[in-house]
Image (cartoon, rainbow, N blue to C red):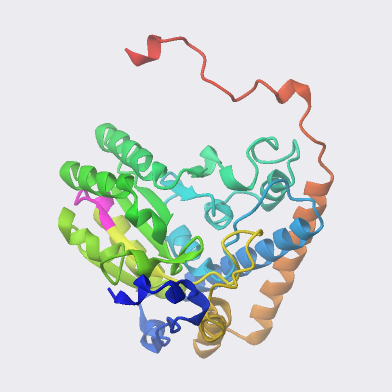
Amino acid sequence: MSTEVHDPGAYDYSQRPARLPVDVDHSNKDLAIPLQDRVEMYELQQVLRQFEKRAYDLFMQNLVKGTSHLSLGMEAVAAGFGLALRPDDYSFATYRGHAHTIARGAALGPVMAELLGRENGILKGKGGSMHLTSVEHGMMGSYAIIGAHLTIANGAAWAAQLRGTDQVAVAFFGDGTTNIGAFHEALNFAAIWDLPVVFVCENNLYMEYTPIDVVSAVPNPAADRGPAYGLDGIVVDGNDADAVFHVASQAVARARAGDGPSLIEAVTYRHGGHSRADPGKYRPADEVEAWLERDPIPMYHQRLLELGVPEGDLAAIQQSVAGRVEDATEFAKGGSPPGEEHLFTDVWAAGGSAWRN
């Protein structure tokens, strides 16, 4: 690691050299992915982008309750894994969980209503942006405690292993989690027990406001730690849905076959700050510009054109998604704040201590 971090001036991160994205690997268009699956991933990326842009607009109108952590620019990761998973598989996410919840099939209206704190929300308005959960869609929660859900994903994977259901658990986490003890504990436990779990680091280069490379002893904070636990260190372009889907499919198939866990580091970039309270001015201007040019959606749009999908079809998808997001917004705004009848529901499990035995 460079010694420049010991210079007080080095902590003006906006003055650091830009960390630039890799070039698009155009050979990924030759991956054996059915064209209809690719169109589905394009549509999903459009849904995630337009939903998050609308969430931003509603936040600026003071309609979103609390803060929000958007996935603008990071849609390819959720889209690739969303297509690779079975409906009965499990997903666990951080507080940046809108995209992963929608990618598992949760309806846009209830998700949007949850952001607004309305009783027609997916959690009746009591979870909000940071705790989206939909068990019926295999979305087992968004967690605000850094790294906590990795060990919970292990529990879900272990339960599936014991039941013999060949279900797979996937835990998404940010790069900052890799310096948390739970990350190392979860990887070690999963490897020891050959659990059907896939750990996915969404490395957007910043652990909140601090560049991850400043506080990590290895270049790839997730993948380079994998070999210590007997796991291959897999790094993938997190802005290419085809690349993500390819490695996701392999890791999920490995877990489903009983061959143990995988660790994937998807390198991506958030278009905005850490949360809506963060203007993101600590990032070098040329770095932001370069990553905006590597936007996953225009790149994928162009790839589909090269693969023969008509521009009119892609435009129709964008227009259809816009209508769906508009409908979801109206549904959300039409909901009421949670009433007193919801105050003590879904707070604790009944049954006393008997369940422990």
The reply to whether residue 85 is visible in this rendering is no
Q: Please state which of residues 111 and 286 is positioned toward the viewer in this rendering.
A: 286
Lateral position of residue 107 relative to residue 9, left or right: right
Q: Is residue 241 magenta?
A: no
Lateral position of residue 17 relative to residue 187, left or right: right
Q: Is residue 260 magenta?
A: yes
The reply to whether residue 219 is visible in this rendering is yes
Name the residue: 23% across, 60% down.
Answer: 225
Quarter holding the C terminus is top left
Q: Please state which of residues 234 and 227 is positioned toward the viewer in this rendering.
A: 227
Region of the chain picked out in magenta, as a range: 255-262
Residue 283 pos. (x, y %): 53, 75
Name the residue: 46% across, 68% down.
Answer: 204
Quarter holding the N terminus is bottom left
Lateral position of residue 260 relative to residue 343, left or right: left
Name the residue: 33% across, 36% down.
Answer: 155
**Height in image: 175 above or below 334?**
below
The part of the image, by quadrant, that contains residue 98 is bottom right
**Height in image: 340 above or below 174?**
above
Magenta highlight: main SS: loop
**Height in image: 5 above or below 88?**
below
Residue 143 pos. (x, y %): 49, 44
Residue 328 pos. (x, y %): 75, 54
